[in-house]
Amino acid sequence: MSTPTPPAKPDSTPAISAPSWSDPQREQHFKHWLTALQPRFQLDPETLRAASADASFRRYLRIEAPGRSLVIMDAPPDKEDCKPFVHVAALLHAAGIRAPEILDWDAPHGFMLLSDLGAKTMMQCIDPAAAPPLALYQQAVDILIRWQLASQPGQLPAYDQALLRREVELLPQWYIGQHRQFTLNEAQQKTLNDAFDCIIQNNLSWPSVYVHRDFMPRNLMLSDAGMGVLDFQDAVFGPVTYDIASLMRDAFLSWDEDFCLDVTIRYWEKARKAGLPVGNDFGEFYRGVEWMGLQRHLKVTGIFARLTLRDGKPQYLADTPRFIAYMRATCGRYRELKPLLRLIETIEGIEVPNAFAFGRV
């Protein structure tokens, strides 16, 4: 989800743009719900404004109350199920992690009043042209370890072979076939299937913990009260390698390999000391992180193509070159993935000179 953008201060904003509604009946349900909440929370409806849209069908609004701002989730129940959000928020709170407090929930209509974790995301506090903010990443690592230490089987859906397979299949369906308009021949389809089998088998070999699934700077909120976590409703019980791969191989931000390696080592050392199942060989763990990151980028590339072609949100595909670069870098390091590397380069129209010299044939 795209987290709320910092609101302008009320005294510096001459007019507040009220959120628009495409469904008049839904707008009436919302106004009725908001009116019923006013005595309890002393909400000021004049301050209601859009905070952010979402890659899904959710959107977020902000509204002022005495001494604080609050966030409203608008999630049409025919398109979005809020129950996982409620459940995972409780798990995060139980783990001692800052997450939105659910102040009121109109389940039949999909409206939720939430506490506001702050005005800025970690992403908004990062200058990609400056030195990477190690202190912020260390905070994120500490939160991640706390989240993983709280893991219990049976609380979240399993990140199993079926789910991993559905994710990677988004790439040929939406990106290769529909966005690139590239038809795989029989040999290329076999290369893709064999690579998917290998990637999934490798990722499932790692022990399972709680997995946020989008643990990255856009979903980490900063405030004086500490770092908070958003966009957790898709959490699962799966490979311990996933969330650190998500953090360091961000869908929207790239750092050089040395920094990614540094933070991953710091995470691994803390996680091992805390008793998490990350193994005793960092090289083996880092390989697992890279393969898990590859799974994620195959999935996200397909999702971003779908957002463009099906949902009319073309802005996401602007980050595709980042994913292709991640894929090529990982595939180029492992012999088992070299056929996938050649296929990706063929689909992208990338000509690699001296392929024999680089061991790609």
Image (cartoon, grey):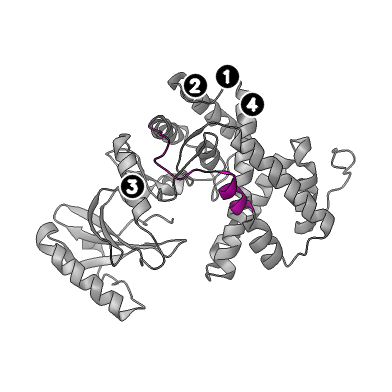
Residue 106 rendering spot, x and y as whole percentages: 24, 62
- Can you tell which mark lies on residue 280? 1
Q: Secondary structure at mark 1?
A: loop
Direction from residue 253 to residue 40 in the image, left or right: left
Which of the marked residues, 4 or 3, is nearer the chain's N terminus?
3
Q: Residue at x 76, y 64 (%)?
A: 182
Relative to residue 15, is residue 187 depicted above or below?
Answer: above
10 Å crowding of disc 1: few (<14), some (14-19), many (20+): few
Q: Secondary structure at mark 4?
A: helix
Q: Which residues are magenta?
A: 150-168
- Figure quadrant of the N terminus: bottom left
Q: Tag 4: residue type?
A: Glu
Q: Which quarter of the figure has residue 320?
A: bottom right
- Can you tell which mark lies on residue 87? 3
Please say whether residue 161 is one of the residues in the magenta stretch: yes
Please say whether residue 62 is one of the residues in the magenta stretch: no
Residue 343 rendering spot, x and y as whole percentages: 78, 52
Q: Secondary structure at mark 2?
A: helix
Label 2 close to label 1 by CB (< 8 Å): yes
Q: Tag 3: residue type?
A: His
Choose between 237 and 307: the one closer to the eye.
237
The residue at which mark 4 appears reads as 284
The residue at which mark 2 appears reads as 272
